[in-house]
Amino acid sequence: MRQAQGFTLIELLVTMVLAAILLTWGVPSFRAMITNNRIASQGNSLMAAINTARSAAVSRSTSVSVCPSANGQSCTTGTSANWASGWIVFTDANNSGVLNSSNQIIQSSTADSSGTTTTASEVAGLASSGGTLTGFTVVTSGTPAYLSYLPSGLLANGPATGDVYMLFLKPQVCSGQQALGVVVNPLGQPASMPASCKL
């Protein structure tokens, strides 16, 4: 007589317990990986927009600005200025940071739906500190409402000498060094670096 093939109830329960343990261990790290990738992706998009503005200013021989925008058609200013809503790159002959009928939109980006927040500030002394944020305070009075590049590729509204502009990208649920800082130095060159969620 042939014996029935298959799993016993004990074998099935042991397999399910092991699978549950592996999922419990793996899902949080997978979630963190997805969050890190979203932050990196949005940071890369923002750096690409800044680089596009800089290169367009040089190639078109006119000033080009990048500003936060909620609708992709106009800059948001004042207390409603939120880089997380998106941004636009446009020609800006008078370096005003205001999109008007004489300006041309070069590129626009819409909001990231992942819940990432982006804040902008001027960080004093970062350029001379070797690139770490430890011990520096955020100077909110120097928050850039927009970045404007001259035809030379330099910032028209750059930070004070030795300071940098920092745009922080941070997920809503943030821990450790999950935030990303997009640094724009006085010459207008952007770079990215990990940043603390506490900023």
Image (spheres, helix red, strand yellow):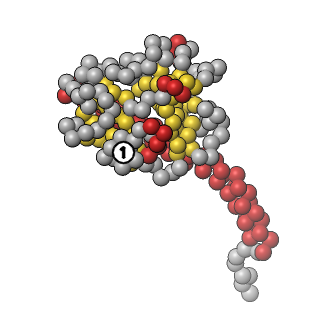
Say which quadrant the C terminus sits in: top right
In this picture, residue 137 sits left or right of residue 113 = right
> Tag 1: Cα neighbours inside 10 Å, few (<14), some, or many (≥20)?
some
* Res. 45 in view: no
Picture mark count: 1
Q: Residue at x 74, y 70 (%)?
A: 12
Instruction: Give the percent coordinates (x, y) of residue 150.
Output: 28, 22
Q: Is residue 155 above or below residue 82?
A: above
In the depicted view, which residue is nearer to us: 54 or 103? Answer: 103
In the picture, residue 197 is in which quadrant? Answer: top right
Q: Residue at x 24, y 33 (%)?
A: 91
In this picture, residue 154 sits left or right of residue 16 = left
Toward the front, the furthest residue is 78
In this picture, residue 91 sits left or right of residue 31 = left
* Res. 150 in view: yes
In the picture, residue 194 is in which quadrant? Answer: top right
Q: Residue at x 70, y 55 (%)?
A: 24
Toward the bottom, the furthest residue is 1
In the depicted view, which residue is nearer to us: 13 or 114? Answer: 114
Instruction: Give the percent coordinates (x, y) of residue 149.
Output: 31, 25
Q: Which residue is mark 1?
A: 109
Instruction: Give the percent coordinates (x, y) of residue 130.
Output: 55, 15
In the picture, residue 1 is in which quadrant? Answer: bottom right
Q: Residue at x 26, y 31 (%)?
A: 92
Q: Is residue 7 above or below residue 137?
A: below
Q: Is residue 10 above or below residue 147?
A: below
Instruction: Give the percent coordinates (x, y) of residue 145.
Output: 42, 32
Q: Amino acid at mark 1?
A: Ser
Q: Secondary structure at mark 1?
A: strand
